[in-house]
Image (cartoon, rainbow, N blue to C red):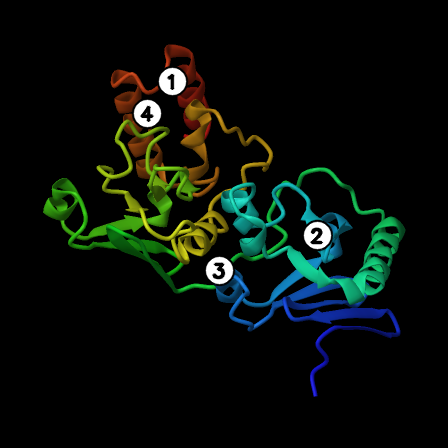
Amino acid sequence: MLRSASVATIGLMAEVIVRDGTWTFDGELVRIVPGQDRRVDALRQALGELTVPLRAMAGITYEPGRKGGRLRLRLRDGADPFLQVAGGKLGDDADPYRLAIDSTTAGMAEYFVDEVRNALMLEQVPPGPCDRFLMPGPAVPLTASAGDGTASFDGTRIHIEWTEWAEDGKKAGGPRQISLDDVLGVEWVPIVGWTNGFLRFRLTAASALMPKHDPNCITWGMRRLGGTTAMLAAAVAARLPHPGAAGGDDSPALAAAPATPAPGDGDHDALLRRLRELGDLHRDGVLTDDEFTTAKQALLRQL
């Protein structure tokens, strides 16, 4: 019979089981399994089991409250593609790295925290940002439906189908097929106040179109988190160049560089195509003269 709340230690393993989910630590990994109770957020249940290696962790805390408290696992910046797109935009209920603890399990939670902290200290895990993803992101293929469209991703290509609620311009353009090679970045924003949420696939350094008019963007106005759109955004982000990789930069001028082939690929046609795209961005005023020059020089060095 499953216990409603417990902690166990077997060798190096510590385990906390509560209604909100189960966290297990074996000295190297924290395994997170969301609970199946109807009060557990649907996004956490859709994400399913997560396995977090020690080297991806920045710390762990137990935060006591009036009727219990919560365990909260903090990851290093850039370790998880899901947090890369959704971090700071999720409420506590949807946060997969938070576990609600009842008043009878506070001591158990504190013991779990001590075990993880001791392991982090022994392994001397650096708390700073990562230059590559240490977690794989959601598995593909993956489909996410929003208010005006449904996006699917198979690992190499994004497909968008419009619903009857899409703007006329989107519907007139028909279904969209976007190659991952053409994607420079992904934006995911939940509903904020009266502003709709959206998932946008960036094909240029910046888009001048509002989300509801952008054919590379799906929007929603009902569910605050847009169902599984954050998962799809993370699956795409996990397969793009890491923003913290050597030479990476979040500035508009260099945002185009990650999508170019690496030196030695011999794909000169793709490089020339990127040069033309940069010229178009410069002509349209998206890139300044300095940004255009910097990005162009970075591409020319690969020819």
Residue 138 horizontal side relative to residue 19, left or right: left
Sequence-wise, the earlier of marks 1 and 3 is 3
Inspect the image, locate mark 4, and give the three-letter code of the amino acid beneath it.
Leu
Sequence-wise, the earlier of marks 1 and 4 is 4
Residue position marked by numbered label 2 in the rendering: 73
Residue position marked by numbered label 3 in the rendering: 43
Residue 155 horizontal side relative to residue 86, left or right: left
Residue position marked by numbered label 4 in the rendering: 278
Inspect the image, locate mark 1, and give the three-letter code of the amino acid beneath it.
Phe
**Mark identifier at residue 63:** none
Q: Secondary structure at mark 1?
A: helix
Up/down of 262 relative to 293, above or below: below
Residue position marked by numbered label 1 in the rendering: 292
> Disc 4 vs disc 3: which is toward the camera?
3
Who's the residue at 40% across and 57% down the image? 227
- Residue furthest toward the bottom? 1
Spatial CA distance of label 4 from label 2 is 41 Å
Inspect the image, locate mark 3, and give the three-letter code of the amino acid beneath it.
Leu
Is the C-beta separation of discs 1 and 2 under 8 Å? no
Sequence-wise, the earlier of marks 4 and 3 is 3
